[in-house]
Image (spheres, helix red, strand yellow):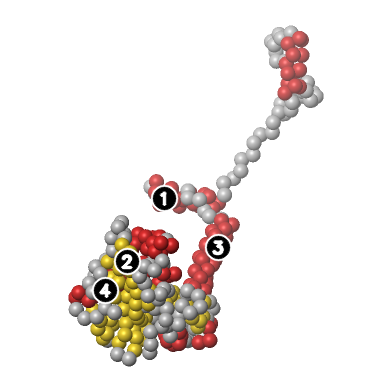
Amino acid sequence: MRPPARPRTPARAPGAPPPRAAGDERAPDQERGAVAERAQAGPPAPPARRVPASPAVGERSADVRRAGGPGAARAASRPVVSHGVEERLAERRAMARRRRTRVVAAWAGGVVLVAAVVWALLWSPLLALDADAVSVQVAGGDGAGRYVDTDQVVDLARADVGVPLPRIDTVGLREDVRQLRGVADARVVRDWPRGVEVTVRPRVPVAAVPSGGDVVLLDAGGATVATVPKSPGDVPEVTVPLEVGAGGVRGADAAATRALRSVLVVLDAIPPSMLDDVRQVGAKTQDAVTMTMRDGVTIEWGSDQDVDLKVRVLDVLRADPSTDGVRVFDVSAPAAPITR
């Protein structure tokens, strides 16, 4: 025999309050308030789904547990690098290699360029000295270099024909030119791109010394300027006892050497206008220099001291009309000159 059926409960509409149990005596107002709160809260949230664990994770965890120990757990928890990061690292390494290649190529190109420039300057024929580009000039105006053999200067400069200009020893060439007779000094400059210019300062003769059948011309320092067949008219003749040898002109003895030195000092100190009027100069001693002018007047200079003062005193005396006819001017003591 079947038991009696359970009475059916009518279906409850959505939002309707649940039926009260027996003995529930809540007031109708409280029920309505609870219903309103449930309505405001909205429908209940669906229950959260549980995502089953990945088999790979489960297997890895099982492996870690089987391996045992915290070290295995840390190794299993290390991040795995994705393929995108590997590609970026590879690209950075490639950029670094390209940058190093460019730097090496730039340095290599610079070295090649410097080597090419050095070769062009020092060994190529581009800057080699041309024989037709050698020039020689004599300082001092017309006639100043009449005792300088410019052909010898040109030959010395042309010894470096074919040598690039940067490799030419201009200092050595200058010293070679200075050794030539009649040259006091020289200046050598490179005349780019293929020439050399030599400027010569000649020695100026201030005294003529008879030597056998010739005449040796001396400058103010006693150096030989030239040897000529006869004395030029504009250079005074020296009557000091001298000796002319391969080493130059020197006094016949020590006293004559000192006398010659005093004569040259006086001739170098007097102005050119007065030097042109001097026909002959001599000295028995270094303190007794005597000059004979072209008009026959004799000037007794004494020593080579106070030459400038003696020149001024002599100019005043010779400009004085009262000295007309005077044949000797003694200015050896310029503070007390004597005329006779």
Camera-nearest label, 3 or 4: 4
Residue at horizontal 38 percent and vertical 84 percent from the top: 231
Camera-nearest label, 4 or 2: 2
- The answer for how far apart the CA atoms under marks 1 and 2 are is 134 Å
Circle 3 sits in a helix, a strand or a loop, which is it? helix
Classify 10 Å Cα crowding around label 2: few (below 14), some (14-19), many (20 and above).
few
Residue tagged by mark 2?
A: 340
Residue tagged by mark 3?
A: 95
Number of the label disc, if any, that sits on residue 72? 1
First of labels 3, 2 by sequence position: 3
Tell which of 299 and 136 is nearer to you. 299
First of labels 4, 2 by sequence position: 4
- The answer for how far apart the CA atoms under marks 3 and 2 are is 106 Å
Q: Is residue 252 left or right of residue 118?
A: left
Tell which of 71 and 304 is nearer to you. 304
- The answer for how far apart the CA atoms under marks 4 and 2 are is 20 Å
Residue at horizontal 76 percent and vertical 10 percent from the top: 28
Camera-nearest label, 1 or 2: 2
Mark 1–mark 3 contact, CB under 8 Å?
Answer: no
Name the spot of residue 112 as percent of width and height, x first. 50, 75
Q: Residue furthest left?
A: 254
